[in-house]
Amino acid sequence: MTDDLHALHAAAVVIAARSGLDSHDAALVLGSGLSRYASTLPDSIEIPYADIPGFPLPRVAGHRASLFSVPIEGRRLLVLSGRVHAYEGWEMSEVVFAIRAAISTGARQVMLTNAAGGVKDTFAPGDLVIISDHLNLTGRSPLTGQNDDRLGPRFPDMSEVYSRNLRERFAQVFTNLGITPHEGVYAWFPGPSYETPAEVEMAKRLGADLVGMSTVPEAIAARHMGAQVVAVSLITNLAAGISDTPLSHHEVTDMAERSISRFTSVLDRVLPILVEHD
Ligand code: HPA
C-alpha cells in the first residue's frame, strides 16, 4: 500500500500539471453509454488515461479512456470517462486506482454512474435510480491487504456509504425535472455473465432493488478516503427472471443510448451540487 500512495501521488502530479490546477473539488465517473457526456462539457481539458501513470486502460467497447478537468460554477470537476471492471481481470487496487487518484487531487465528493438491471417491481427500463445502499455479493474488497493509514482507516465505517445529504439534494433535482426520484439497494455481482434468475431471486430476498457489475468497489475506496459518495444507476433492463426475455449487452447499450438525454439533463443539474463544499 505504501507503493500505492506513491503511485497515486505520481498520477495526481500529472493531473495537476496537465490541468494547470493544484486541486479539484469533485469527481464524476461515467458508466456504460455515458462517456460521450464528457465531451459536451465546455472548456474541459482532456487528459488521456494513457498519459497518467498507473491508470489502467478500459477494455470494454463504449468506455472511452480519458479524464477531463471541467470548470463548473467557479469550481473544478474531474470527469472519469471510462472505468475498468473486476471482471476484466484487474486487481481490486487497479479497479479503484482512478477514483483514488481523483480523491488524491482534492476531490471531496464523488458521483458514480452505471447501468443496472432492475429487480424491484416498480422499476422499468429507462428509470434512473439513486443508490441508497449496497450489497457486496462478490466477496471481494478494494481494501483487502495491508492498510495504509494515510489513505484511510483499517476498518472504515460503511453505515452511510451513499451520502444522505447528496441523495436528498439529488432527489429534489429529479423532482424539479419531472423525473421520479427512485431509490434502491444495489447488489454488486462479479459478472461478466449476467445473473441467473435464481441469483436475482436471492438478491431480491436479501434486499436488492437493482443489480450490476461495478460501482461498489469505487464507493468503498472513496469512503475509505473520506470522500462523500453519491451514485445513480440507469435501469437498462429488467434483471434475469424478472422478465422472461434473455439479456444481451446490446439491450443494455441500446437503452443507455436512448436514455442519454435524460441522464444528461440530470447531470447538468446535479454537478453544481456535487462541486459545492464549505
Ligand atoms: N445485471 C448486471 N449488470 C447489468 C445488468 C444486469 O441485468 N444490466 C446492466 N448492467
Image (cartoon, rainbow, N blue to C red):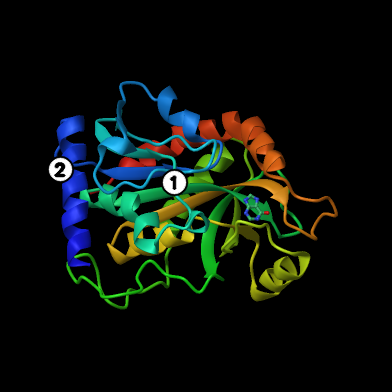
Residue type highlighted by circle 2: Val
Residue highlighted by disc 1: 83
In which quarter of the view is residue 204 placed? bottom right
Residue at horizontal 42 percent and vertical 70 percent from the top: 141
Label 2 crowd (10 A; few <14 / some 14-19 / many >=20): many
Residue type highlighted by circle 1: Arg
Residue at horizontal 83 percent and vertical 50 percent from the top: 245
Residue projecting furthest to the bottom: 155
Quarter of the rendering occupied by the N terminus: bottom left
Asked if residue 261 shows in the view, the reply is yes
Residue highlighted by disc 2: 13
Of the residues under marks 1 and 2, which one precedes in the sequence? 2
Residue 145: x, y in percent? 31, 75
Residue projecting furthest to the front: 89
Residue at horizontal 69 percent and vertical 39 percent from the top: 250
Horizontal relation, residue 233 to residue 54: left or right: right
Residue 82: x, y in percent? 44, 41
Residue projecting furthest to the right: 244
Horizontal relation, residue 88 to residue 221: left or right: right
Give SS at disc 1.
loop
Give SS at disc 2.
helix
**Disc 1 and disc 2: Cα gap in Å?**
20 Å
Instruction: Report how many numbered discs are placed on residues in the image.
Output: 2
Depth check: 243 or 87 in front? 87
In which quarter of the view is residue 218 placed? bottom left
Residue 35 against residue 57 in the figure, above or below: above
Residue at horizontal 71 percent and vertical 60 percent from the top: 120
Residue 12: x, y in percent? 19, 45
